[in-house]
Image (cartoon, grey):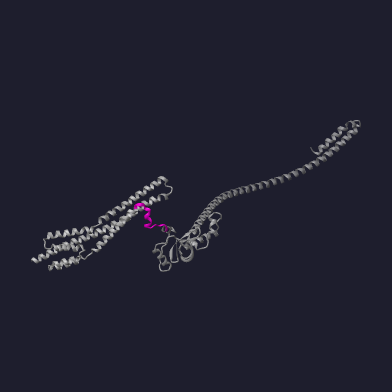
Amino acid sequence: MTTRHLKLAAIFLIIFVSAPVLWAEDMRELQIQRREAREALLEKAKAEKAAAEQAAAQSRAHILADRNALEKAMAELEAANQKLKSQVDGLNDQAERLGQKEVELTEQLAKTDSMINELVGVIRVNAKDLDALIKQNLQTAMADDVRSFLEPIAAESKFPGMADVRAMADAWFGQINASAEVTIRKAEMIDRQGREVEADILLIGPFTAAYRVDGETGFCSYGSAGAQLYALSRLPPGRMQRQITHYMDGESDAVPMDVSRGGALRQLTHELSLWEQIPKGGPIVWPILLILAVGLVIIAERLFFLLRKRFNADALVERIDALALEESWQACQAVCQANPGIPVARVVNAGICCSHLPREEMENALQEAILKEIPPMERFLSTLGMLAAIAPLLGLLGTVTGMIDTFHIITLHGTGDARLMSGGISEALVTTMLGLSVAIPLMLSQTLLNRAVDNRIGEMEEKAVALVNMVHKHKSVKRT
């Protein structure tokens, strides 16, 4: 509702209220007043209408201006909104790309982490290996401690950096260079009596260490726990000692060394000689040793017999041939009797004594003389063969008894402790070894002695035939 309407309503309300009073007044004046009032009201209404129209026009102008401004603002907002939408779309695309890149970077980071973890693991493993190598290297007994930086890396209490990796590389190359070094230096060591002495130490890389002190030469072992060199409890053979001494004095280019880093030296320390192994064979070894003793006595006796009977039979036959041509048979006998202990001389003498007999009888006499000489020459050879056959059988018997003892121990105690079974196994193996060690040389000696006896017998038969042919050839020449 406008102001004009409100004013009209107010006028009508006043007229309606004052109507009873004015009713009494003059109707003419009332009409005039009404006319004047109406005209005033009309004028006022027109003025108010014009003012209202002017206000409405102004309002419309303001509204139109506000509308234009609002539309412009809306257009600007819509443009800004479109711009923001495009920016949001760009940001969404960028966020999507960044998300994909984040996934890629996450995967790459995971791969890098795994590679780094693997690399660190390899470094730690190499640190442990290097620490163990340095710890077991006998040259560290002569050097300062170079393992301090390796222990925290190997124990996974420190992340290895490039400085640690370079230090490890230098340590590796140091070990490689040290493995090719051969040096002689003065150093402290523990001798075989348990005393700490200063000795000349020969270091051959990380493999072997030898010492020389107070005229004693031997090998050293390395105790990694105390980083100390110890002399082996047993000295090496004399040949090795001489080789080490000559090498340390610069007189030789060769020296024995243990490439197994102490394994062969420990084996040398615990190696038992034949006489140290014999008591481990049980009671069976004593009959085998008795067989060996008897066999050696027989071999020595046979060798002495055969060597004592050595003789130049060819010279004897040539001498007999010269005397037989002159028919000096007594001189021939004298030549043979000058060597009474020689079997071939006795055989030839027997033939000369029968030279007047026919050929067959002379041959029979010579054959009889040869057969008479054979038993002393073959004496004890069959016994030697028998001993050679008995020795491996006794060794086999010791093997059986040793295995019986082993199985008995297994029955009582099981197989948990191999040391309980070592006695029976030692008995089984030592007796077999000893039986074969006795049988092989006895059998070889018997074969060689039999061949020597056969050669002697063949020599006697040859000279007997030569004598028969010689005697009867001279008789034929004489008859002619």
**Residue 40 rendering spot, x and y as whole percentages:** 86, 38
Is 277 in the magenta? yes
66 or 162, nearer to the observer: 162
Residue span colored magenta: 269-284
Say if 40 sits above or below 337 in the image: above
**Residue 337 rendering spot, x and y as whole percentages:** 18, 65
Say if 117 sits above or below 351 in the image: above
153 or 192, nearer to the observer: 192
Please state the total of marks drawn on the protein image: 0
Q: Is residue 173 visible?
A: no
Quadrant location, the C terminus: bottom left
**Residue 275 rendering spot, x and y as whole percentages:** 37, 57
| Secondary structure character of the magenta stretch overall | helix
Quick check: 275 left or right of 189?
A: left
Residue at image location 13% in from the left, 60% down from the top = 362
Quick check: 455 left or right of 86?
A: left
Most extreme residue toward the left is 480
Q: Is residue 387 visible?
A: yes
Q: Quadrant of residue 242?
A: bottom left
Quadrant location, the N terminus: top right
Most extreme residue toward the right is 25
Quick check: 453 left or right of 392?
A: left
Quick check: 179 left or right of 86?
A: left
**Residue 374 rendering spot, x and y as whole percentages:** 21, 58
